[in-house]
Image: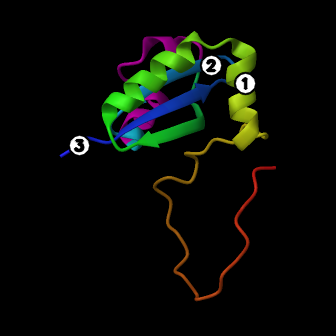
Amino acid sequence: MLTPGYVYILASGFKKLYIGMTSDLEGRVWQHKHGINCAFTEQYNIKQLVYFERYDDIRDAIAREKQLKRWSRVKKVGLIVAVNPAWKDLSEAWGKPTEPFDGKLREPERFV
């Protein structure tokens, strides 16, 4: 059985970037936000999840992380802006209660 993996990008308020890879995205982002096992992100206050990709095989996530780390800053920013132009923290609602489904379909939320 394959282990899934995630590649993610965190940003600070000043747009300092950190690229990482994990098999537990929610747990790893929690660690970053609480300063556990992440000296670089703690030092630069990098706590906003602005981008992530999921892979069925963690080996693909590892390869993608290596690829993204070789990219220029301009190319990384372009990747983020393409899916999250407002640089919204994609993890801000994690752990909060959700509304029960009322049976009505709505348009998907846009990052604005």
Q: Residue at label 1?
A: 77
Residue 78 picture location, percent across and down? 75, 28
Bounds of the magenta segment: 27-45
- For residue 95, say whether it is visible: yes
Q: Quadrant of the rendered structure where residue 90 is?
A: top right
**Prevailing secondary structure of the magenta residues:** helix
Residue 23 picture location, percent across and down? 32, 36
Q: Residue 10 shows which numbered tag? A: none
Q: Residue 2 shows which numbered tag? A: 3
Q: Residue at label 2?
A: 17
Give neighbour class at mark 1: few <14, some 14-19, many 20+ (Cα, 10 Å).
some
Amino acid carrying mark 3 in the image: Leu
Residue extending furthest toward the right: 112
Amino acid carrying mark 2 in the image: Leu
Nearer to the camera, 37 or 59: 59
Nearer to the camera, 82 or 46: 82
